[in-house]
Image (cartoon, grey):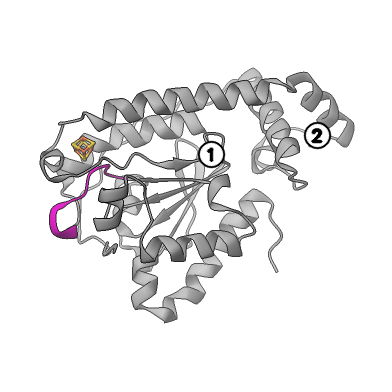
Amino acid sequence: MIARNPAPEEPSPEQEPAAPPTAAALAREIAFRLEVNRQLGWSVPLASELRSPGRRSTGSDRTDQGAAVSGSVAAERERRQALLDEMDREVSACTRCPLHSGRTRTVFGVGDPCARLLFVGEGPGYDEDRQGEPFVGKAGRLLDRMILAMGLERSAVYIANIVKCRPPGNRNPEPPEIRACLPYLHRQIEIIRPEVICTLGTTPLRALLGASTGITRARGQLFRHEGIPAVPTFHPAYLLRNAAAKRPAWADLQKVMGFLGLPVS
Ligand code: SF4
């Protein structure tokens, strides 16, 4: 079972300021996202559209843009998956930090390489270490239900962790371990280019988003990673132990849904 607890005080790694995307790159990304939405049957406005300066796309624009990139989405998904697979192989042989010595399997991440939503947890627990997949234990089943409640499926999002190897005894990862492993997550995010990130618990809040407070104070607030909106919420393992926290966690997920343009009832 997963027993990942909110982390104690930890310094957060420095983050490089991101160069803003060019207008052409932004337009290509929007066109690609529109086509992904069309193929997935999404009928909601894109968060990237809502964030973009200038006028909103019209229905005919969408059709034109979608047609222009039709056929390239499958190729793009394949390209991103190949990049992730290549990195997965690299990670499976990684010995950058001491956590490699106690792992059964590395836990790279799982989901759609073109996912609009990325969940980031802390690190593998017992079940994940054996199965090589994040969030597969009791807390993972709760995360699945949270995703379903948002109107999504696990296969439509991407799920990753701050560290790819299980800390012994399910302890929190140490700052040097986080610093050693974080570049992998940064590269995953660069490849997947999610529209929204939802961090789970204190460790990703601090390690990825650079917060100095804990999850209880920071949950539901808007952060950014390389310009991508990020909303921190409680870790599902914490929610299993604290049923009263489920209501604020749902409010946080509704904020995420707002960024995705999903209907909030
Ligand atoms: Fe490498 Fe990350 Fe595993 Fe450490 S936790 S050995 S950096 S993959």
Residue at screen point 60% across, 65% down: 149
Against 236, residue 186 (above or below) is above
Instruction: Answer whether residue 235 is visible to the viewer in this image.
Output: no
Q: Which residue is mark 2?
A: 57
Q: Mark 1 to mark 2: distance in Å?
A: 25 Å
Does residue 78 appear in the picture of this structure?
Answer: yes
Residue 226's place in the image compared with 128, above or below, is above
The percent position of residue 161, horizontal first and vertical second, equals 34, 46
Question: Which amino acid, by three-letter code, is at mark 1?
Answer: Asp
Q: Which residues are magenta?
A: 162-170
Relative to 197, 234 lies left or right = left
Q: Up-down: is 16 above or below 149? A: above
Q: Which image quarter holds the C terminus?
A: bottom right
Give x and y (percent) for residue 138.
Answer: 37, 66
Q: Nearer the viewer, mark 1 or mark 2?
A: 1
Depth order, front residue of 252/131:
131
Q: Residue at x 31, y 45 (%)?
A: 162
- Of helix, strand and loop, which mostly describes the magenta segment? loop
In the image, 59 versus 69, the foreground residue is: 69
Q: Quadrant of residue 116?
A: top right
Which residue is denoted by mark 1 in the rendering? 112
Query: Which of 100/208 is in front?
Result: 100
> Left of 110 or right of it: where is 251?
right
Type of amino acid under label 2: Ser
Residue at 34%, 30% in the rendered image? 88
In the visual, does 148 lie left or right of 6? right
All told, the count of numbered labels is 2
Q: Quadrant of residue 140?
A: bottom left
